[in-house]
Image (cartoon, rainbow, N blue to C red):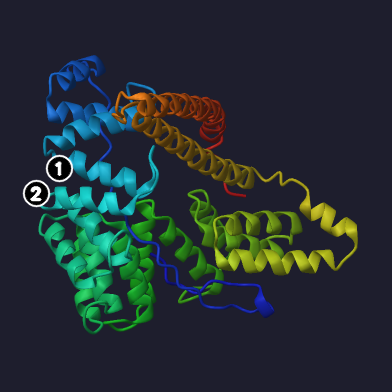
């Protein structure tokens, strides 16, 4: 989470922006199949009805490890495992329905699966169900019940749940704000390696919430979080050096940290880079780079990026056409190209997920028509024939969706290859 003010172009002064990026607990990525338990062994064990093997096999399909990524196969094996009451599989089905992996997003169904796993005391499901209650996804918002579930998960030392409890106390979602409690919970989560909690401890120290204001301590926590790869902390450090908050203004350091955060897709950092290139903070002003970074930020829905892009575009278009044409030309900065590839990867993954979900839905419609169980009288035969025709149409559409998804997977592999090849781009 990052709560620092962000520079915006509106009226050419800085406005405050509160960003509430939240932690999300995830099912741990499964290890690649070993020689002792290879993919084919998992298939045999899963087919024999072993719930843990079914879950592990589903993970292989879900992650694309040991087999091509296939959400349809993943769903099949997760369901078989979940039907035997295996909580991790129930939780993962909830995750797929919440985020639309291979299925249409269905918050109500996600809540049902999370509930089943949570009732068995599974910490990740308790966390995920609490998140649904907190954000009113598929269920009425209930902060008290959410906090109770976060506490149950925290009792099992789940760091993300500990961090969320700190956030609840910081924001006063249940009762009055209690910064002392927030700090205590953030420290507990940080001790378990949670970088979002480290970032929040930095913010609270810098603001003087629940403690004397201390920029040195704030920067120390930000550095810890940044060392753990936290993009918000990296962006916060950049912002501190950009504005000289408790330190000497150092545009070079600021830009370096913004580039680190932007490399992870942080939209605030992308917006700040646009600002620095527009106004020449530590670099020569560059309209093309400023425009490109603002666009990357805006494309992620960052409101400051959107505002800055709109305002800067208007400024450029007020000048002669050559100024706009020059700025609007494709950027050649390697870091910008890398960020554009990253966004392309996100777009491709999103589109592939949508096509997979559509194909699964078409197959489901076809199954319903083919197994509708109509009577074998004259009228029933007519309906059966119509159902068969409809089922064929649904199957054909599912095949088209999967073929399109396969083509996009080829583009994704190529883009990912380019992204990996360029991943060591040095900061300018």
> What residue sits 30% from the left and 77% below the top?
171
Q: Is residue 279 left or right of residue 30?
A: right
Estimate how packed mark 1 is, as few (under 14), some (14 to 19) or many (20 or more) residues with alpha carbons within 10 Å.
many
Query: Does residue 112 lie above or below 154 as drawn?
Result: above
Residue picked out by circle 1? 87
Q: Give the total of numbered labels.
A: 2
Task: State yes or no: discs 1 and 2 in contact (Cβ < 8 Å).
Answer: yes
Q: Quadrant of residue 373?
A: top left
Residue 71 visible, this angle: no
Q: Position of residue 61 (x, y in %)?
A: 32, 28
Q: Position of residue 248 (x, y in %)?
A: 52, 73
Residue picked out by circle 2? 120
Alpha carbon distance from label 1 to label 2: 7 Å
> What residue sits 16% from the left and 62% below the top?
149
Residue 415 visible, this angle: yes
Query: Does residue 65 lie above or below 350 as drawn?
Result: above
Estimate how packed mark 2 is, as few (under 14), some (14 to 19) or many (20 or more) residues with alpha carbons within 10 Å.
few
Q: Quadrant of the N terminus?
A: bottom left
Residue closest to the eye, 379 or 276:
379
Q: Quadrant of residue 236?
A: bottom left
> What residue sits 30% from the left and 84% below the top?
212
């Amino acid at each position: 989470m990052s709560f620092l003010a962000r520079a915006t172009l509106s009226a050419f002064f800085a406005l405050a922006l509160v960003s509430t990026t939240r932690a999300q607990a995830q099912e741990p990525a499964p290890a690649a199949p070993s020689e002792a338990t290879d993919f084919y062994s998992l298939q045999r064990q899963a087919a024999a009805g072993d719930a843990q093997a079914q879950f592990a096999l589903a993970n292989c399909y879900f992650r694309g490890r040991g087999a091509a990524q296939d959400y349809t196969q993943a769903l099949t094996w997760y369901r078989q495992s979940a039907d035997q009451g295996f909580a991790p599989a129930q939780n993962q089905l909830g995750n797929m329905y919440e985020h639309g992996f291979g299925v249409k997003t269905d918050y109500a169904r996600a809540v049902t699966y999370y509930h089943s796993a949570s009732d068995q005391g599974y910490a990740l499901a308790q966390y995920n169900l609490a998140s649904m209650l907190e954000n009113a996804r598929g269920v009425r918002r209930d902060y008290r019940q959410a906090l109770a579930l976060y506490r149950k998960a925290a009792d099992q030392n789940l760091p993300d749940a500990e961090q969320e409890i700190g956030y609840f106390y910081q924001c006063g979602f249940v009762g009055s704000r209690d910064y002392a409690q927030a700090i205590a919970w953030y420290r507990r989560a940080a001790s378990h390696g949670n970088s979002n909690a480290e970032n929040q401890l930095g913010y609270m120290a810098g603001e003087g919430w629940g403690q004397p204001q201390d920029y040195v301590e704030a920067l120390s926590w930000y550095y810890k979080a940044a060392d753990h790869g936290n993009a918000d902390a990296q962006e916060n450090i950049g912002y501190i050096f950009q504005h000289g908050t408790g330190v000497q203004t150092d545009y070079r350091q600021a830009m370096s940290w913004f580039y680190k955060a932007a490399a992870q897709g942080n939209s605030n950092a992308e917006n700040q880079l646009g600002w620095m290139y527009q106004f020449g903070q530590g670099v020569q002003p560059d309209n093309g780079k400023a425009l490109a970074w603002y666009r990357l930020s805006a494309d992620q829905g960052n409101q400051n990026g959107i505002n800055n892009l709109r305002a800067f575009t208007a400024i450029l278009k007020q000048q002669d056409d050559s100024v706009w044409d020059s700025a609007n030309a494709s950027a050649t900065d390697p870091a910008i190209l890398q960020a554009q590839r990253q966004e392309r990867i996100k777009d491709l993954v999103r589109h592939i997920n949508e096509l997979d979900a559509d194909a699964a839905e078409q197959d489901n419609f076809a199954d319903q028509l083919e197994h509708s169980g109509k009577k074998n009288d004259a009228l029933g035969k007519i309906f059966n024939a119509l159902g068969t025709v409809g089922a064929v149409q649904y199957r054909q559409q599912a095949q088209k969706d999967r073929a399109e998804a396969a083509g996009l997977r080829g583009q994704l592999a190529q883009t990912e290859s380019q992204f990996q090849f360029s991943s060591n781009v040095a900061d300018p």
